[in-house]
Amino acid sequence: MRLLHTMLRVGDLDRSIKFYTEVLGMRLLRRHDYPEGKFTLAFIGYQDESAGAVIELTHNWGVDSYEMGNAFGHIALAVPDAYRACDEIRARGGKVVREAGPMKHGTTVIAFVEDPDGYKIELIQHA
C-alpha cells in the first residue's frame, strides 16, 4: 500500500489551483469535469502521481465555501529553509500565519501558511 492523495473541498477551483501552483510551486497534474455529478477534480503536486502523494482539489459546482470543522489539522511540506520559504510565499501573494521559527518545546524550524480556503500548510525545515 501507499498513500495516493489527500482531498480538499475548495470554493473556487481556479483560485486554489493558482495558489498551489504559483505560490507553493506545485504542478497541475490533471483536471476533469464531471457534469453529471456537478463537480470538478484537479490533482496537484510536486511530482507525478505514480511517484508520490498529491492533493486532490474537489470543487462541487454551486458551492463557494465550506465550514472547516475541527478534525482536519494541516498538510506538511518539507522545505530547505523555512525563513526563505515564508519570504518567497509572501512575495507571491501567499498568507503566512505563523512565521518561521523553532517549534514550541523543540528545535525543528517550522512555519504555517494558509491557502485561499483557510487550509493550513506547515513548512518543516529539512537540511
Image (cartoon, grey):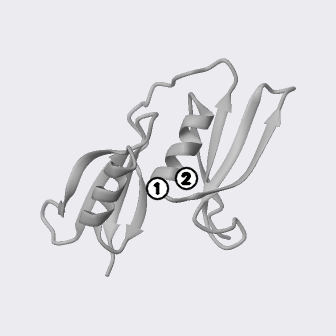
When the figure is inspected, residue 123 is found, relative to residue 15, above or below; the finding is below
Left or right: 125 with respect to 55?
Answer: left
Residue drawn at (61%, 36%), measured in percent from left and top?
14
Query: Residue tagged by mark 2?
Result: 21
Q: Real-space Cα distance between discs 1 and 2? A: 6 Å
Query: Residue tagged by mark 1?
Result: 24
* Secondary structure category for the residue under label 2: helix
Residue 124, percent across and down?
32, 66
| Residue most extreme to the front | 91
Residue drawn at (78%, 25%), measured in percent from left and top?
38
Residue 57, percent across and down?
62, 43
Task: Report the front residue among 86 and 32.
Answer: 86
Left or right: 85 with respect to 46?
Answer: left
State which quadrant residue 27 falls in.
bottom right
The quadrant the C terminus occupies is bottom left
Question: Disc 1 marks which amino acid?
Answer: Leu
User: Does the CB distance between marks 1 and 2 fall below 8 Å?
Assistant: yes
When the figure is inspected, residue 13 is found, relative to residue 21, above or below; the finding is above
Residue 83, percent across and down?
24, 64
